[in-house]
Every structure is written in C-alpha cells, then in structure tokens.
Amino acid sequence: MHASRRLLMRSRVATQFLLFRSPPGQGRCVQPETGVPIARDGDLISSCQSFSPFKIHLRTFAKAKKAKGNDDDSAPYVDVYPTVKENAINQMEASLDALTRELSKLRTGRVSAGMLDHVTVVDNNGMRSPLTHVAAVTVIDNDKLRVTPFDSSIVKCVEHGVRSSPLKLNPVVDGDIISVPVPKPTKEYIETMLKVVGKAAETAKLSIRRARQTAMDAVKKSSGNVSKDDIKRREKEIDDLTKKFVKTVDDNCKAKEKEMIPG
C-alpha cells in the first residue's frame, strides 16, 4: 500500500516538474521555472540524484518552410516565349482548319468537286476514310457530280456516305458509278446557310482570341525576368498574329457567302 502511494506521488511530481542532472556533489531536486529546491517526502527526495538548480526554458520550433518558388535561387532563367508563340500559332491554325471543315459542309450555288471533301465513308469492315481517299469526284454538266469508287465492293458504302452528308443530296447508284444531282439552293436555304456561316466565323474568332489570351498571360508571367520593352514587343507580336488570323476568318467567310449568293 505504501509502495503504491509513493509511486503515485512520483507520477504526480513528474507531471509538474522537470528534473535535470548536474555534476556530482551539487545534486538536489529543483523546480525548473524558479530554481527553488523541491521539499517532498523523504522517499521522493532520496530518489533524486544530482540535479541542477539552473533555470531552463524548453521550447521546440517547427522547421521553417522554404518560400514557395525559391527552391533553387541559382537555377538559370529559361525564356519560354518562343514556345508560347508557337503554341498560339498552332491553336489559331487549328481554329482556321475547323472553320474550313465547317464551311465545306455548306452547299453553295456553284457545283464543285470539293463540296464533298468533308464526306466520310465507312467500309464493310467498319473502317472510316475520307471520300477523297476511296473515290474520285468530277463535275458533270455544272449541276451534277460523278463519284467513282476505286473499289467496286464499297459502292454502297460510298453512296451512304454521300447521302449522310449535311448537304442533303440524293445520290443515285448506276453500276460502279454514283451520280449526285446538285439542285440549286432555294432562297430560304441560302438565308439559313448565311447565318450558319456567321456563327462559324464567330466560333473561330472566339477560339483564336482564347489562344491570344493564353499567350498574353504567359508573357505577363515572365515580366519579372524580361525588360518592359521586350514585354511590349512580345505583346504586339501576339496581337498582330491575332489580327492576321481574324482577318483570314473574315476573308474565308466572305468568300463562302459570295459562293452562296447567285449572280
């Protein structure tokens, strides 16, 4: 019973005081905050061996984190502008390509072999190919197209591809040849298609301007390592590219509108 009480007292004291070892001959139990010797029962004091009365403050500190982005101050600066500019050009060219594909799907008042360039043919094995890869297209009598498949086994596949076109044509199979009458577009059709052209133009311009904004943001981020004159020069280059591609969009759409309007 007495042993249990002594153990309990030692436990309580341990939670209130820290005991520090000192050189032999100077030993006593002290309270760390005040340096005052601790007078406890004989059993506890007798268990203290060589402790120093010096006051000690114990505190731990978390290791300071490195500032973000400063992992290696000696790392050389790499100018990414050439890549930024190239990416902007690629994105703008992709916007023009998408516009060209959309415009090719629209029927105009003029018959041309290129009006079927957008058609895709799915052969008997499920393989998809552009019409121009599997057949030859020629203009007959200014109001009809003749489609000649290179492989007679896919005539039906080619016919289905032409019929599925947004141009809403009605091809006719005659042996290994496919005839495609191209009726003159009605006034209502022309008006509808002009609206489609306008919408396609706006979509292309929006995509081009997004590419411009991405490039401009990248240029501004590098302003800490590039002179103000260089920043202005680069921003002007991106703006000039944007204007060039937007003008190409306008020119292509105006040409398409001209094809649609008779006379």
Image: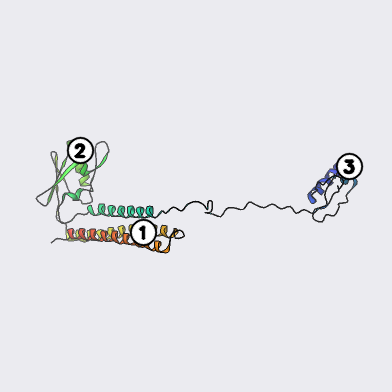
Assign a secondary structure to mark 1. Answer: helix
- Quadrant of res 239: bottom left
Counting residues from the start of the chain, the first of labels 3 and 1 encountered is: 3
Tell me the amino acid under the disc marked 1.
Answer: Arg
Can you identify the residue that label 3 sits on?
A: 2
Instruction: Judge the density around disc 1: few (<14), some (14-19), many (≥20) Cα neighbours within 10 Å.
Output: many
Q: How far apart in space, not on screen, are marks 2 and 3 (Cα)?
A: 104 Å
Residue that lies at the very extreme toward the left in this rendered image: 141
Can you identify the residue that label 1 sits on?
A: 212
Residue that lies at the very extreme toward the right in this rendered image: 42
Q: Can residue 230 be seen by looking at this rendering?
A: yes
Tell me the amino acid under the disc marked 3.
Answer: His
Q: How far apart in space, not on screen, are marks 2 and 1 (Cα)?
A: 45 Å
Locate the N terminus and report the quarter of the image it occupies: top right
Q: Position of residue 207 (x, y in %)?
A: 33, 57
Can you identify the residue that label 2 sits on?
A: 154
